[in-house]
Amino acid sequence: MRRYHQALAKSEERLRLSIWGSGDELWDWNIETGELYRSSAWLEPLAIAPKTEDFPPNKQLIHPQDLERVSHALSQHLAGNSPFFEASYRVKTADETYIWVLDRGKVVSYNETGKAQRMTGTLKNISQLKQAEARMQLFARCLENISDAVLICDTKFNIIEVNPAFSVITGKSRDEVLQSRFQLSLYPPRFIQEIEKKLVKDGRWSGEIRELKTNGDYYQAELTFDVIKDEQGFITQYVAVFSDISDRKRREAELSRLANSDTLTGLPNRAVFMNKLASLVTDKTEHALLVFDLDNFKKINDSLGHELGDALLCKLAERLHNNKLFRQKLYRLGGDEFAVLLDNTNDIHAITSLAKSLLEQINKPFAVDQHELAVTSSIGIVLFPEDGKDPQALLRNADTAMYHAKSSGANRYLFFNDTMNKQAVKRLQIENLIRHGLKEDYFTVFYQPKMDLLSGKVVGMEALVRFITPKGGLVSPGSFIPVAEETGQIVDIGTVVLRKACIDVKRWIAQGLFHGRVAVNLSAKQFMLPFLCDQIDDILQQTDLPSYHLELEITEGTVMQSPKLAIDTMKKLRARGIHLAMDDFGTGYSSLAYLKQFPLNTLKIDKAFIDDMSSARGRNMVDTIVTIAHNLSLSVVAEGVETHEQLEQLRKLRCEIIQGYYYSKPLSAEDFAAFLVEQKKQRPKVALL
């Protein structure tokens, strides 16, 4: 008997130690009496009363949200509807916090009526399991809902699991890909092999891929592979995450296109051109650069509008881009200026052939907005390394060559040389000198008298600009006027001349030395100024010179650029009492139909016709001009008269006014005042003839 009790005691001790070691709690509930026995260890501080009428007996400790579920499960078991009772719920601890427990039990005895009498079970702390479960659920929800695709593969790249985003991005369902090998249809098998090598070596691989969806669309993704290892450090799986970057790549491509493409024509822009040119120079690659623009493009813009001009540039870019000779070589530098880059060649024959083809393509008429436009072009060509050692020098010299090609006649190409460069440098120096001269007031006015042929009296004078620097002396008008016209500085120079001429003439009138008109030349750019009339009004008002004493000389080339606009402007000037003269008549392309519409007072015969009067043909030409002028009720001024013979011939042809070295060279304001004084003293020179 003793041995039995000893064996029983040892068995109970083993059971108690096992339960204690497992962390579980035993409970024994006498359902009829309400007594509850607990072998509590971890819940002892919250041990409930040994006798209770609550249901469940630990009701006060169960979380309110779990109570109904626990009561229902217990009731079902007591009613015999379940083989055992099991519920996980939250129970309150001594510090007023809740922990998760797993409660299991079973009715072990019934009374004579079959009602449950005794129930035993265990209570297990599962808080850590619940926390791990919550984490797993959180991770699962993240994988289910993130927009990035996730796939898990074994070490042979067979797919074990994918998330929903994988199907969205690839178009492949989960069931379709499970247990299949991961592959990229646009890449060779060795690509996956390289990924595997990288994973084994470094534990990670990342890169961008381009792949096909099941519907045939392309997508781009940022793909990252990582390894999963077991506790021994062996690789067990690969996990891949890839993000769809198709929209981002499209935006980047669009931004790149906008940054590198000309917004009007779609051609590579100046920035791309300079990068390419710099690359060729850096690599010391022989190449040729052709820079070209359209001749008289400004006239197209001014006469037909900028929208039509832009359309023309687009048509030109499209035509050249579609020609295999220029495709991938053509750039738009800005405005109507383009460039062609020829890599790896300095073959003059090949370059000239391409330049000729370029001119031919440009010369073909363009149909733009119901207009058929025929345009010409000028091309400047440089070779590397002969014509420049850096991109800036090459482009500058190509522009110089193009400028000289344009000066030599429309529709030409010209290679750069040192002479052009020297001329370009000189032109830049003159441009800077003009700018300095305007600032420092180096521009002054000389006057050449206009003499009445019959009376020999001074009836007027022409104001001629002179550029006199303190150290450099006189700058030839032939040097600075063409540059000033090209740069637009001629407008400021013209304003200076007009103002100074009005001041001088007002003074001479006040001194009683002069009562005629001063003729001031208007450049084409001045004549086209929208505020020209207002500007002249201001100068006349400021100098207090009556408009009757002012004559404006306009070349026929100027008025024929836009005859209708010219007529409108000339009428406004005539309405102010200002006289108008057409300078250099006969040297341009005047239309007699327009000439009779121009509100002129005077025609000036160019010196070239006067010089040619020694021939019958020349005399007839002058006679014709005088006759036209008289028929239009215009006076005539012959300029450049230098000899007595010319004077006599003009007298016979009934020319009224003479200007030239026969009477006087152009004089400074001081010398011209002295000339006027002498004229008052002397008898008219013509009386001696």
Image: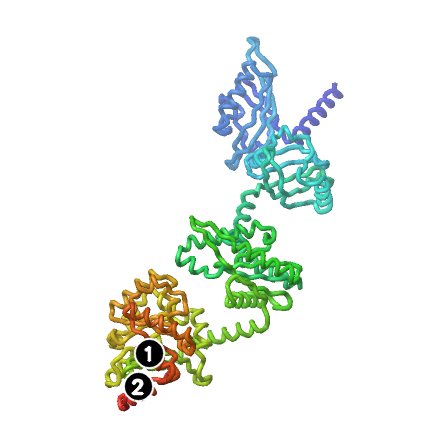
How far, Cα to Cα, is label 1 from label 2? Answer: 14 Å
Q: Secondary structure at mark 1?
A: helix
Name which of mark 1 and mark 2 comes first in the sequence.
1
- Relative to 487, 119 lies left or right: right
Q: Give the residue drawn at x 55%, y 12%.
A: 115
From the image, state whether disc 1 or disc 2 is nearer to you.
Answer: 1
Q: Give the residue drawn at x 45%, y 50%.
A: 368
* Percent x, y of residue 580: 30, 71
Give the residue pinned by disc 2: 686
Mark drawn on residue 365: none
The image shows a total of numbered marks equal to 2
Give the residue pinned by disc 1: 652
Q: Nearer the viewer, residue 54 or 293?
A: 293
Q: Relative to 67, say whether 316 is above or below.
A: below
Please identify the quadrant where the C terminus is shown.
Answer: bottom left
> Does the CB distance between marks 1 and 2 fall below 8 Å?
no
Q: Relative to 216, say whether 253 is above or below.
A: below
Q: Nearer the viewer, residue 421 or 207?
A: 421
* Percent x, y of residue 193: 73, 41
Q: Relative to 498, say whether 405 is above or below.
A: above
Type of amino acid under label 1: Lys
Most extreme residue toward the bottom, as rendered?
681
Residue 549 seen in the current view? yes
Q: Secondary structure at mark 2?
A: helix
Indicate how the structure is coloured in the image: rainbow
Most extreme residue toward the right, as rendered?
3
The image quadrant of residue 498 is bottom left
Residue 492 seen in the current view? no
Type of amino acid under label 2: Val
* Percent x, y of residue 454: 28, 82
Label 1 CA crowd tier, 10 Å (few <14, some 14–19, many 20+): few
- Relative to 641, 48 lies left or right: right
